[in-house]
Image: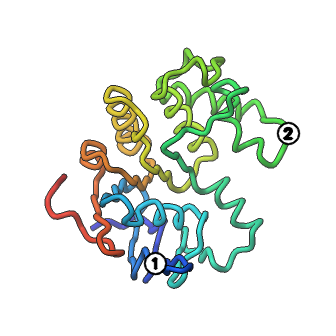
Amino acid sequence: MNHAPVLVELTDVHVRFAGPLSVEVLRGVHLKVLAGESVAIVGPSGSGKSTLLHLIGALLSPTGGSVRIQGADLSQMNERELAELRNRRIGIVFQSHHLLPQCTALENVLVPVLAFRARASAEEVARARHLLDVVGLSDRVDHPPAQLSGGECQRVAVARALMQKPLVLLADEPTGSLDQEGASALAELLQRLNREESVTMVVVTHSESLARGMKRVLELRHGMLHPREGRP
């Protein structure tokens, strides 16, 4: 029996986008993610996968239902508390790496630390260097994004997302903009982080190979989550 604590819990979550043609994207989603789990969310384009990830990342509020991170209901938090949650407890990797072009790899990894103060401590700089080593970029510390490949930039983005030791790492189509070699390397990195570093992660992906490496695969269909029948 798994006694790991629940880090992420969605209960009867609905999301409706208003407008001339009102669209209900999520229709009663239930999800629990335990510490140390890796979960892949798959489904067709437009099914609401990114919307679901944005809910977990406190980037979007549901129309109905609740989203809890480590037991805390996000709807009860003010903007400052939500910003701190996103900075300290949730790491997010998007399809595009969103690195600062004028900064080195090391400086980009330190960005979450510098969001609330002007200078990083020696210990934080050491952690950033360690994370770049973990993602295989110890020899790219002083390189700006223009001198890195797409796959290397995504690995810097993963290191940046882990800088604050988040409760959960969220990845939205992290291999979508990469070539086959870069996508395979990043998928292997994410699997290794979960296996060796016990990083809890939720990954939205169209990649069957990336989904196959996660411990659990869920499919979003008609606004609801379903266990994937068989392995991808």
Residue shown at 63% from the left, 18% from the top: 143
Residue shown at 30% from the left, 44% from the top: 210
Q: Identify the residue under disc 2.
A: 118
Q: How is the image coloured?
A: rainbow
State the separation of the CA atoms marked 2 and 1: 43 Å
Q: Are marks 2 and 1 in contact (CB under 8 Å)?
A: no
Marks 2, 1: nearer the viewer: 1
Q: Amino acid at mark 2?
A: Ala
Q: Identify the residue under disc 1.
A: 23
Q: Amino acid at mark 1?
A: Val
For numbered disc 1, what is the local secondary structure? strand
Please state the horizontal and vertical placement of residue 21, each as a whole percent of the image. Answer: 49, 79
**How many marks do you count on the picture?**
2
Front-most of residues 141 and 208: 208
Residue shown at 36% from the left, 75% from the top: 223
User: In the displayed image of the protein, which residue is found farthest to the front?
Assistant: 20
For numbered disc 2, what is the local secondary structure? loop
Rendering quarter of residue 19:
bottom right
Please state the horizontal and vertical placement of residue 220, each as a whole percent of the image. Answer: 32, 67
